[in-house]
Amino acid sequence: MKQAGYLKIGSAPAKGDRLKVWWNHPTFRRVEAIYSPDGAIAITAYHVQP
């Protein structure tokens, strides 16, 4: 995500010992992503409304 120009704007624990991360981009909509507990594997990611 960082290589694509996104900036991490926040994170929080998620269900199932996973990690939820919010990403912002100057051009594209914000992305919410769910990662494995160690943050190494993106399980899902989706655009959210501004």
Image (cartoon, grey):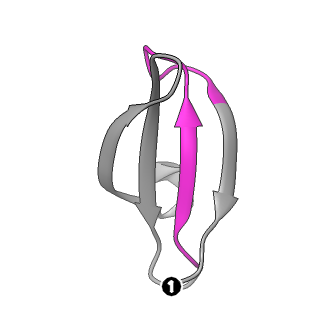
User: Which residue occupies the foreground of this view, 26 or 34?
Assistant: 34
Magenta span has 37?
yes
Dividing the picture into quadrants, the one containing residue 48 is: bottom right
- Compared across the picture, whether 9 is left or right of 34 comes to left
In this view, 31 is above or below 25: above
- Compared across the picture, whether 23 is left or right of 9 comes to right
User: Which residue occupies the foreground of this view, 41 or 34?
Assistant: 34
- Which residue, as the protein is rendered here, is positioned at the far front? 15
x and y percent of residue 1 in the render? 53, 50
- Compared across the picture, whether 5 is left or right of 4 comes to left
Q: At 56% across and 37% down in the image, what residue appears? A: 34
In this view, 42 is above or below 38: below
x and y percent of residue 38 in the render? 43, 14
In this view, 30 is above or below 49: above
Q: At 45% across and 40% down in the image, what residue appears? A: 20
Magenta span has 40?
yes
Which amino acid, mark 1? Answer: Pro
Dividing the picture into quadrants, the one containing residue 13 is: top left
Secondary structure under tag 1 reads loop
- The residue carrying mark 1 is 50
Dividing the picture into quadrants, the one containing residue 12 is: top left
x and y percent of residue 29 in the render? 58, 78
Q: At 52% across and 71% down in the image, what residue appears? A: 30
- Compared across the picture, whether 31 is left or right of 37 comes to right
Which portion, as a residue range, is magenta?
Answer: 29-42
**Crowding near the residue tagged with mark 1, few <14, some 14–19, many ≥20 C-alpha atoms within 10 Å:** few
User: Which residue occupies the foreground of this view, 15 or 22?
Assistant: 15
Q: At 48% across and 64% down in the image, what residue appears? A: 5
